[in-house]
Amino acid sequence: MSIQFGTDGWRAKVGEDFTVENVKLCTQAVCNYLKSREIADNGLMVGYDTRVGSADFAVAVTEVAAGNSIPVTLCDRPAPTPVVSYNLVRRDCAAGVIITASHNPSDWNGFKFKPGYGGSASQEIITELETCLDSVLEDQRYLSLPITDAEKVGLVERVNPELLYLNHVAGLVDLGSIRNAGLNVIVDSMHGAGSGYIRQLLEGGTTHVTEIRNEMDPTFPDMKQPEPIDRNLEPLKEIIWNSNGDVGLATDGDADRLGLVDEYGNYISTLHTFALICQHLLENLGMTGTLVRSITMTCMIDKLGDLHKVPVIDTPVGFKHLGPVMMEEDAIVAGEESGGYGFKGHIPERDGILSALMILDMMVKTNKNPADLISDLIDRVGPHHYNRIDLTFQPEERGQIEERLAKAQPTEIGNLAVAEIDTRDGYRYVLKDGYWGLIRFSGTEPLIRIYAESESPNSVNSIIEECRNIAGI
């Protein structure tokens, strides 16, 4: 059995590797890390999602922290990841642990670690954590104090994390105008921890919110996994058609990602959604500053940056890269292809709830529904289409594939000249007009992911096919 902290901690199947015992060993590693940094006295924030056993796993984390004499602030109910992350920052905790597998299938769970700044752990922090974990796994020991005893001696405080968060995000948009805009908003919580948040924020005015799949159901029925992507949002599209909805907003299992559907029931890609958010911040809110995107995010951001004369920085995939750049550059926004967007004045991390509020704020300030907003965006930056395919390979084939990729020096892909080959995270071929193709290995599975963005679906398909030929898979 191997436990490894990835970009967002550790995930595994419940009952196989993800067990109470292993969660306790992980927590002991976190405690050792906090002690080594001499920040353990600031305490640990612990939250959890709606999955089977999440509350019990959170108690296991709490008991080990208490056994190490580390104060714990424990959420008294399931909560979205960004809510827990914001709370740990506001409460000046040393770090946080959130029991969630985000958008993974229902038989998975996870152990997310958040440093005191509330974002994803940097690679340096992950390396230190893994060193601590290796030592704990070798000894197979942890300290533990039953939660009832920990509460008696004041080491555990149970809190409702909602109020601090709701009051904060309400101040980041013109909430009064959204509440009284008379919008018909359809929210799909996908049976996850985000249930009720957008409704609570918008109630009390003329805007009407209909929430679907808002019952917390750990089986996530009728979907392979609670990820707000096109194939999982048919119920949301149907409600929009039947109720004359103005917009559909979907959050994933722990509500750190957003899926967007327009008033006609059409899914809007995460690339276009992030471009809309950037356009809103620059044009409607008058913000200036750096835009940060992952290398798999759209080049529409670069074109918006050129239009508004603001810098754009791209990073390897993952908020462990995006977040630190956000903080270093005091960036106004950061986004990745998976549908996660982070905002200045908040936490350097994804937040699906705040992302949804930003889309609503844009609709109200422009008096336009999503389809018209997309039309305006295309007028500014031109047509952009995107696709990604995932291809499996045998692990023993990886060396040969890597050798082929390293040797390949294409001058043209999909009838577009190759202007640059970026190898920071895979092989990214920068093409004419900023369009691109990318070949990169998955960090967790024997998969090669091939991405492409171009001016037409046919061009996208050609880029993907030629990248596949380069990889020889």
Image (cartoon, helix red, strand yellow):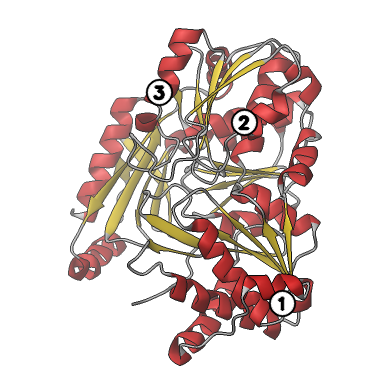
Whether label 1 touches label 3, CB < 8 Å: no
- SS at badge 3: helix
Percent position of residue 177, x then y = 78, 18
Residue toward you, 416 or 313: 313
Position of 261 relative to 94 (above/below): above
Percent position of residue 75, x then y = 67, 55
Checking the image for residue 356, the label placed there is 2
Mark 1 to mark 2 CA distance (whole Å):
36 Å
Whether label 1 touches label 2, CB < 8 Å: no
Mark 2 to mark 3 CA distance (whole Å):
18 Å
- In the picture, measured across the screen, residue 286 lies left or right of residue 304, that is right
* Residue positioned 18% across, 63% down in the render: 394
State the residue position of label 3: 235
Query: Alpha-carbon neighbours of circle 1 within 10 Å: few (<14), some, or many (≥20)?
Result: many
- In the picture, measured across the screen, residue 47 lies left or right of residue 56, that is right
Mark 1 or mark 2, earlier in chain: 1
Name the amino acid type tagged 3.
Answer: Pro
State the residue position of label 1: 70
Q: Quadrant of residue 36?
A: bottom right
